[in-house]
Amino acid sequence: MTGKQEETLKDKLKHFLGISKGSSLQTSNVRPASKEVVFTTELLKEIGPESPANNRMKTIKEWCDVVLAKNLEDNAVETLWLSVADLLQPHIIVENRHIAFKFIQCLIKGQYDHLGVMRAYFFRLVKEHSLLEDLPQRLEVFKILTDSGKDLTYFEEETGPFLLQWLPEVIMSSKVSEFLGLIINVIKYNAAYLDANVLSGFVQQTCYVSNRTKSEEDIELCLRVLDAVVCYSYLPAESLYHFIEALCRMVNVERFCQPSWTLMRKLLGTHLGHSGVYTMCRILQESCNLSDVILLRGGVFFIGMALWGSKKVTSLKHTPTSVLPSFQQALQSNHPMVAYEVVLSLQRLVKKYGKDLILVTWDIILDIIEALLGHVESVPNKDSTVATNLHDILTSIEDLYETGQYHGSAPAFFLIIEKCASKRPESSVLVLISYRALSIHPAKEEWVLNLYQLMEKYFRYEVRTSIRLKVLDVLSCVLSANKHLYEDDIIENVVLPQLSHIETDPDTEVRNVAVQLLVDLGQSCMSSKCLDLMDILGKVLQKSLLRSAPQSPTSRDLLPGGLFMKDDNQLSDIKIAGVGMVDIFKYKLFHLPSSHATRAHELLVSHIKAHYSNNYRSQMASSIRLEILQCFLQLRTDTMYRLGLPDRMSDSRLRYSPYVLCQYREEGLDKPSQRVSPPSSVPPSPTTITACKMAVIPFSQTFHAIIKALEMERDWEVLKVVLEQLPALMQNKTLLFTAREHMESLCSRLCQMVSDRSLGLPDILDNTPLRFTKSDFHAFIFPVLTYLASYNAVLDRAKQRDLIRCLEFGLVSKCARICVSALTVCTMEMQGVMMRQLPAVLLKLSQISATVTMSIPMLEFLSSLICLPKLYANFVEEQYMSIMAIALPYTNPFKFIHYTVSLAYRVISKWFLKCRLPFRKDLVKFINKGLHANVIRQIEETAVWRKSEEQKMTIINEDSSHRRRGGSLGEGLKKRPQRLQTSITRGGIIDEGMLLFHKELTETCIDMLARYTFSTCTAMPKRTPVTEFLLADGQTQSWLLGNRIVTITTSGGGTRIGKSGLCEKCSALCKNAAQNGDYSGSGRSRTSSASNRRRHKSAAVSRTVTLVEPLKVSSLDDLQIHRQSSLDDASINGDVDGALSLDRSYSSVRQTMTDDVDSSVDNLLLGLRQIPSDQGSLTPHLCNCWCQAWAEIHIRRPTGNIAWMMRIENEHLLSKSNQDFPLADISMLFIATPENTFDVQSLGRIDSESMEEVEYENLYDKHFPAENVSLAKQGASDDDKEFNIEGVTPLDLAYQTQDSVPPGDNGEDSDDENEHQSMPSDFQSSQARNISPASKSPLRRFNSSPELSSSDSVKHSESLPDLQQQAIKRSYELKQGQSETGVPTIRVRGTGSKENITTDTSNVKETKSESHLAVERDIHPKLQQQLSVDSANLSSVSDDIQEPFLSPLRKPRGHTISVMTPSKEQAMGGKSYLKDGARSGINPSFVFLQLYHSPVFSDTEERPVLLPQNQVISRALNVLDRITPYETHKIGVIYVGPGQAGKENAILSNVYGSSRYAEFLQGLGQLLHLKDCNPEHIYVGGLDLHGNDGNVAYSWECDITQVIFHVATLMPNKESDPNCNSKKLHIGNDYVTIVYNESGEDYQCGTIKGQFNFVNIVIQPLDLQSNAVTVSAKEDIAPIIGHTDTKIISDAHLSVLVRQMAIHANLASLILIRQRTNAHDPYASNWLERLRQIKRIRSKIQLSDQQPSDRKQKSPTEDFTDFV
C-alpha cells in the first residue's frame, strides 16, 4: 500500500481541519486565527448519545484537539456541551466520564473567551458533581474555568463558600497543593468577594494543613496562603491564635524559619501586633503547652526577634520586663530546646540592649540565668551549646560591669559567677577576684581572713595559671596599699603560709610571679620579716639546676655524674630570685637595717660559687651569673670604705652607703693613701661612725667570685661583660686594696689567659661569635691588663714582668693601640721592671707596621718616654736605632695625616737631641735613609706618576681610540692617588702646596741633624759684655747661603790713635781701670746681688763676666764645657778674684772710665796679673791689633742660631804686634756621605690591623713557647734575661752591618770623652778595651740623659762606676799641671744658658809652644789656684744644689741642650750709623770669602747672596728673629670643686684647690715670678708681668719646647670683674684646658665658654693617689688626637702624663687652626716657620735684584764681588 492509502481517519480529520502534522495546540485562551469549524449533523451524531459508545468516545477524543485549537461557530459550545453532558452521569463508567471531563476541559480552554454564561454552567457542574473519584477532574475543570482562581466571572459570590466547603474534601485527597494554590489566587485576585467567615475558615484549615502535613511543599503553600490573607485581605481576630500557633510551629523548620519570621513580622506590624505578642506570651504561660516544646520555642523566638531582634518590629512598645516572665515560665518545660532558645534570646537582649536595661529587668534576667544554670546542671547529658551560650551571656554582663554599663545587682551577679566559677572562663574568674578584692581592706571586718580565703581558694587549690596569678596580683595590691600599717600581719598570716614552699610549685609562671612578689616585698620590708622572705628566696636560689633525664639529651648538656641541665624555662624563677636578690642588695645597701644587705650579699656570693662548683652551663644559668657579676663589678667604695653603687638616676654619679662598710685592714694601707681631697672637708674615719649599727661586707669574697668567673666561666657573653667592666672596677683602688691578697691571682689569671695555651681559650668557650679567633679574644683581655699597672705596689716583680710581657705581645694584636697606651703607663708606674724590659719592647715596636690606628699611641709612647730619664739612661745605639725605626715610618705624608707627620718629626728631633754624641753620627745615616724611603722617594714617585698621567691624558686627547693602560711605574703607582686621603691631599687630589710642605719638613729635620750631630749647643746665642766691647762700632754684613743667613760682624776699634799708641776706645778703658784702682771691686759689687743664690760650681770658671744668673741644672753636658780652661778665655772672660768685671756694652764701660792711663792693656783685658812698672809702655800698634783682630760669625738656621768669636792671627802687612794673642779658629765640617738605597717598605714589619689569624698564632707561639705553662711559673731568674724577638735589631732593619762606635770617637763631646782624651794613652787603651759600648754598665748615665731633678743630680755621681770616677779624677789632676793655652777653643754663646759657655775641641792635637808656656807661667796665682780647685771639684757632681722655691730662673732642663731663649740684643742685622770710610777694622767680606768662597757654585741656591742693608731686609730679619727656634704652648688649668660642675663663674672664681691639686701643679713645671721674667727669653703666653694676671705662673721647657700654664687659681679675683673675664681672657682662648675635676660629676665640654677651647683633659682624682685621665674634645679634633680610653695614673706621674697629652693636643689644635685659616701654609713647627721666612727673604732679594737669577755658565773666573 502507498502512504496515501495508509492515512487514518484522524489524519484525514486533521487535514480537513487544516491542522498540520507538526503543529501543536496553543495553550492560550485566544481563539486561533483559523477558519471557524462548522459542525454538521453527521458530526454531532457521531458524538451524541445515538452513536455507539466506542465510536463516540473515539470521536470525542479526536475532537478534543479540534476544540482546543480551532474556533467554533457560535452556539457550538452549548451544542457540544449538550451532546456530551450525559456522559457525566454517575452511572457512566469512570473512564468515559473522565474522557468527557477531558473534552470539557479542552472545550473550556480552547473556547475560553467565548464561553459567556456557559461559565456558570460549568461552575455548577464542578460544584454539584459529587463523585469523589472525579475530584481531580473537577479540580482541573475549576482551575481552567477560573484561570487558576484568578477569574470568577459569573460565580464570584458562590466561589468562597464553595471552596471553604470543598477544602476538607480536597485535604483528604492528594490535591492539597493544587487547591492551596487556587486559594492563594482567589485571595489575591478576589479578596473582596470573600467574607470574614470564609477567610477565617481558610486560615484555620490552612493552619490545620500546616500542622498535619510533613510535606515541605504543602507547608510552603500554607505559608503563602497565610501571607496572602495578611497581605491581600485581613486576618480575622478569631483566627489569630491559630495563625500564630501555626507560625510558631513552622518556624522550627529550618527551611521556613526566615519566611515564617517574615510573615510574623508582617502580622505584628498590623493592628494585631500587640495582640500577637500577647497571644504568644499566653502560649508560653499556658501550662498545657509546656509539653509542646516546638510551640514554646517558636513563641520565644518570635517574641525575642520582634522586640529586640536584628529586625525588630518598631511599632511594638513592649518592654523586656513584660515578656521575660513568660520566658521564665517556659523554662519550666525543662527542655533543652526551649532553654536554648531562651538563652539565645537573652543573649541578643544583653548584648544589644544590656546597657539600657533597668534593675528590674536585670533581676528577671539573673533569675532566668540562675534557672538556666540549674537546668544545665540537672540535665544528664549536659548540652554544651546551652552552657556555652549561657556563659557567653555572663561574659557579656561582665563586660558591661567592667565598662560601668551594668545597672543590675553586682552581688547577685557575682554570686552566680562564683557558683559556676569552676566552669567559667579564666577571664570571668579574674573579674570575680577583682570584685572580691574590692572588699579586702581594713574597713571590712576580717579582711585579712578574707584575703587568706581568697588565696586559699583561688591560689592553693586552683590550677589555672592566670587565676593564680590574679590572686597574687591582688595580694601584691593589698600589700602595696597597707604595708605601712599591716605589712607584718599580712606577711605572717598570708604570705608566709601561702608562699613558704613556692620553690616546689609545679607551675613555672606562678613561681616566677610569686618569687617576684617576694622580691618586691623583701626590698621594701624593713622589719625582721625581711630575713624570712630572703630565706624563701634563698631556698629558690639553692634549687638544683640539674635533672637526671633530659627531654632532648645532647652531649653538650651532659655534666659530670650523668646529670643534665634543666630547661631554661624551668629556671626562670631562679633567675628572678637572683636578679631580685641583686636589687634587694642594691636597695638595702642604703637602708637600715644593714643586716639585710649583708644577708643578700651572702646569698649572692654563695649562689655564684654554687654555679661554678656545679658547673652550671645553661643559657639561663649564664644570664643569672651575668646579673650577679654585673652587680659585683659595679661596687665602689670611697676613702671611708663606704660601699656604693652608681646612682639609679644618673649612672655617672656614685652613691655611697652610710650603713655598710667594706671590710678592710687599716694597718695594711699606707698613710698617704688615706688622704682625702679636698683636705678642708676630711670626713671622720669609719671607726668613728657608731650612731647606728654598721654592717661590714667582705669584698674579698666578692672579688674572689669575680676571679672564679675568670677561671671557670665558659659562657663568652658572661666572660665578656666581666672583662669589659673590670677596668672600671679597677679604678677604685681603695676597694680592690681590701682584696689585695687576690690581686696577684687576678694578674696571674689574666696573663695565663693570654700566654697559657693549655687552657684552650677561646675554643672552649660557648656562645662565641662566628669566627671568633684567639686575637679577638685577647682584644678583651689587654684592656684589663692596662689597668694592672697602677697596682704595681701589690704585685711582685715576677708578676710585673709577666704583665709587661703580655702587653708586649699585645703589640701585635688587634688592640695594639691599647697596649701601647698601657706600656706608656707602665713606663711611669713600673720603672724598675720596665728598665730591663724596655729594649725588648722597643724592638717589638720597631717590628710593627706603621698604621693609621697605631700612629698616635706609638708616637705618644716615644714622646712620654723622653720624660723618664731613668729608663733610657743605659740606652746604647741599638735602642736609639729602634726608636728611630719606630718613628720614621710615620713621616710618610701619603699614609698619615698632618698631625701625625708633624708629631713624628717632633719625636725624631727630641730623641736625637737625647742621644749621646757618639751615636748621633750613625743615627744621621739611619734617619736620612728613613726620610728618603718614607718621604723623598714617595714624593718623587708621585711626581713620576703625575708626569705619566699627564702624558696619558695627552695621548687620550690626541686620539681617544688608542687609549692605553698602565705606566712605567706599575700598578702600585696607579693606585697611589686613590688612597691619598692624607695630609698631602685635598679632596683626594694631590696638593702641590702640601708636597712642598713635606719637603720643607724634611729640610728642617736635616738642618736639625746638621746642627746637633756634633754639638749640644743651645738654639740661640747671646753676646757677652766683652764681645759687645770688641764689636762696638764694627762692620756687619749678611749673606743668604742656602737656607742659612750668615752675618759677620768684625771688631771696630778706634778711628784715631793717641799719643800713648792707644785708640780712643782703649784709652777710655784704661782711664776707667786706673780711676777705679781696684779691678775686682766692680765685679764684686755687680755680682753681690746674686751672691745669695746658690750657684753651680761651674759658674766660678765662667768664661765671661755677666749679670745674668747661671743655669740651675747641671748635667754632664753642662759640666764638660768647663773641664778645661785656657789663658785666652780666662784673660778675656775670667770671673775670679782681682779680675776686672766688664759691663754689657761699650756705653757702660764709658760710664766707669778713669784717668789712669798707666795700666797695661794686658792688665785691663786679661785682669789676671799686674804689669811691673819697669816694663814700659805699650807699642803704638799693640792696641790696634787687639781691637781689630776680632770677628763674629752669626748663622741663622731654621732650627736656631749659632755664633762664635774668632781672632785672625795673621799679622798686618804694614805693622806688627809686639805680643801675640793666640786664638785658633775651629770649624767642624759636616761632610755629606753617599746615600745607599734604603727601602723601609722592605723591612719585616708586623701589621696588627690586617694580620691573619695564622700569622697571629705563629707570633703567639714564638712569644709564649709551648714549654712555658704560664707566666706565673717563671721564677725570679728572669730578672737577668734579656728578651730579644727573633734576634732582630733596629740596625739589622737599617742595614746588614753596623760598625761599633769606638770609645774615642772624635764626635763625642761628653764628659766621658773629654776625660778620656785627658788620660794617658795606656789608660785610654785599657779603657777602650774594657769598656766597650756593648759592655758598659747598665747603671751608667750618659750625658744624653734628659732633665733630672735636683735629687737625681745629687745621686748621679754615686751611680758612676769606680773606674770612671778614677778616670775623671786623674784627668783633672793632669789638667792642673799643664797649660791649656795652646788648645784651640770655640766660643759658643747662648742666652738660654744664662751664662757664657766655652767648649774645647777634642780633635786638635795638643801642642805647647814656648809662647804658650810663657803665658802659662804668668797666670795670676789666684786663677791658678781657682783652676786647681775647680778641676778637682768638677770630678764629682754630687754637690747639693738647692734652688729657691720662687726662683725667677727656668726649670731644670734636659742635659743635651741648654735653655733656648732669643737674644736680647741683636746688633747683627741693624743699619750702620758710620760711613764705611770712617770705620776701622776688618771688612766682613774678607772673613766671608775666606770661609765660604768657592770658584764655582753648583746652582743658584748655593751661590751666596749678599743681603742689602735696607728696611725691607731689616724687617724680614727681625721677623725671623722673632720666630723662636722652639715650640711655645699655652695651656689652661682650672679646678672644679664639689658642686661646681657646669658653673663657669664658680670654677673661674676658685683661688685654691685641694692638696692633691697643688701637688699636681707643682709637677707641671717650675713656678716663676712673672715680674722677674723677660718675655724675650721666657714664654709667658700673654700674661701680664705687672701683677694683673697674678704674681706667679707655672712654666715648663725642654730642648725644643716652652710651655706656660694659665692656672685659674693663681690669677687674682677682682671686685670689678665678678664674672672673671680677666681669667677667661686667657683660659677661654687656650686651645687646650686641663680640668682637675673634684666635683664628683662629669665635666661637660663648653662649661668654660670660648671659641678656641678644642680639647679638655679631664682629671678625675681617685682614691689611693690614683687618677683617671680622659680626653674630651670637639668632633673635628677628636679623631686627630686619638685619646679614646681612660688612663689610670698615680699622683706621682700624673703631671708628666697630662703635660705630654696637653702639649700634643695643643700641637694638634695649632695644626687644625692653621688648616682652617691658611691652608696653603700648614703649621708643623717653628723650625718650619723659620725656614719659610728665610725663603721669603730669598724671594724678596730675587724680586729686587735686577740680575738674572740663574747663571747659565759656570766659570772658574767667576766674579765673587757680585755677592760681597
Image (cartoon, helix red, strand yellow):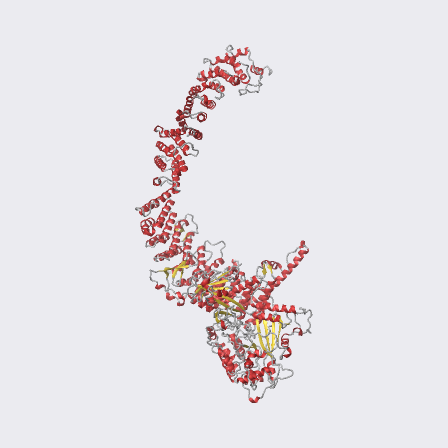
Task: Determine whether 520 is above or below 1338 in the image.
Answer: above
Which residue is pictured at 63% across the width and 69% down the height?
Answer: 1738
Residue 362 image offset from top left, x and y in percent: 36, 37
Q: Residue lying at the far front in this picture: please name it.
A: 1616
Between 388 and 189, the one nearer to me in the picture: 189
Q: Residue lying at the far bottom in this picture: please name it.
A: 1174
Is the C terminus in the top left, top right, bottom left or bottom right quadrant? Answer: bottom right
Q: Residue lying at the far top in this picture: please name it.
A: 50
Residue 365 in sight from this viewpoint = yes
Q: Residue lying at the far left in this picture: please name it.
A: 445
Between 175 and 914, the one nearer to me in the picture: 175
Task: Determine whether 1209 is above or below 1345 in the image.
Answer: below
Residue 1264 image offset from top left, x and y in percent: 48, 62
- As drawn, is 1111 to the left or to the right of 1215? left
Q: Quadrant of residue 1147?
A: bottom right
Residue 1430 image offset from top left, x and y in percent: 50, 80
How many tags in the picture? 0
Between 404 and 633, the one nearer to me in the picture: 404
Q: Quadrant of residue 387?
A: top left
- As drawn, is 1156 to the left or to the right of 1614? right
Residue 1385 in sight from this viewpoint = no
Residue 1173 image offset from top left, x and y in percent: 55, 89
Task: Determine whether 806 is above or below 396 in the image.
Answer: below
Is the N terminus in the top left, top right, bottom left or bottom right quadrant? Answer: top right
Task: Determine whether 261 is above or below 1363 in the image.
Answer: above
- As drawn, is 1637 to the left or to the right of 1190? left
